[in-house]
Image (tube, grey):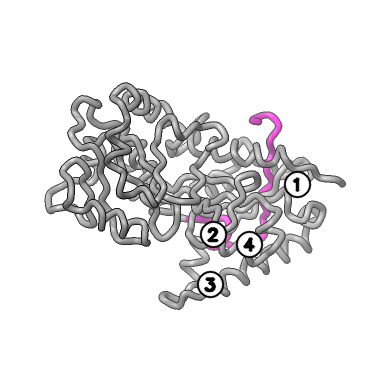
Amino acid sequence: MEKLFKIYVYEEGEPPMFHDGPCKSIYSTEGRFIHEMEKGSVYRTTDPDQALLYFLPFSVVMMVQYLYVPDSHEIHAIENTVIDYIHLISHNHPFWNRSLGADHFMLSCHDWGPRASTSVPYLYNNSIRVLCNANTSEGFNPSKDVSFPEIHLRTGEMSGPLGGLSPSRRPILGFFAGRLHGHIRYLLLEQWKDKDKDLQVYDQLPNGVSYDSMLKKSRFCLCPSGYEVASPRVVEAIYAECVPVLISDNYVPPFNDVLNWKSFAVQVQVRDIANIKRILMGISQTQYLRMYRRVKQVQRHFMVNAAPQRFDVFHMTIHSIWLRRLNIRIRD
């Protein structure tokens, strides 16, 4: 892949909505990827005729910031911007029309990334869409699209040290703290908040209690979907060496082509929220220790590095895109 895979980044478009993106906040993976491609990673080529894939460098996060009217729930301006950009690309270059967008990709960590892509049918149906919001019920196609992780970088750098207490020193069976975003969290809090000392579920942590410290002393970290399927809690759990418990329907976890999520995470369907404690208690100590060790092993695949390193989140994302490109045949 490192020798053969070359990506051309279209030069059309002006910052901040193109060629730029947030490198801190809940949407940091979107901005980080765009910035790495703009810097000229090992995968970038300036010769479009040598490229195997073409990157559409728009940021849905920045479009929301500059085009969305708060509380309007109206994203036509964002959709129209994507339409105009694809129109510009297709008129300036032969590559989009040659493949009807099949050897092109977009990337977005914003909840509205999938919606923005629906504005151009070929982008939605043919192109590779790299999305945090990898929801099959909203059109995410695992054979064509790529799921990548949502990572909350509060300061723009790695947030907090890796690691936590050893398994024998983790007194909490399961932990969650978060706002009531979406019906899944409502069901979780309704079922478990203040109900069981083994499952510590909060909508707001008590004063003086550290969220990070709770992650680091819990055996399992509950990661329910919010308004959309992706959650930064999955990676926060992995950083804290806490076995993630994915509570969602229709979510495709990141890098699942090469990572066996069942070996280091627990997947719970929404209808089984009432049975979470029974499910977790049913995991033997031997099985838990195996999952704990595998969480530590996969950490490096979710690491954000100032300069990307092999097997980190940037390279894993590129690898997932590369695998999708191998399924595409382009006829000149």
Q: CA distance from mark 3 to mark 1?
A: 32 Å
Q: Nearer the viewer, residue 311 or 123?
A: 123
- Residue 119, picture quadrant: bottom right
Q: Which residue is mark 1?
A: 48
On the rendered structure, is 258 left or right of 178?
right
Q: Nearer the viewer, residue 132 or 275?
A: 275
Place of residue 70 in the rendered image (x, y in percent of width and height, measured from the top left): 42, 75
Residue type (three-letter) at the residue carrying disc 1:
Pro
Q: CA distance from mark 3 to mark 4?
A: 19 Å
Residue furthest toward the left? Answer: 208
Say the numbered circle drawn on residue 75. 3
Callout in the foreground (1, 2): 2
Q: CA distance from mark 3 to mark 2?
A: 11 Å
Work out whether mark 3 precedes mark 4 in sequence or the reverse, and give the earlier one. Answer: 4
Q: Which residue is mark 2?
A: 113
Residue type (three-letter) at the residue carrying disc 3:
Ile
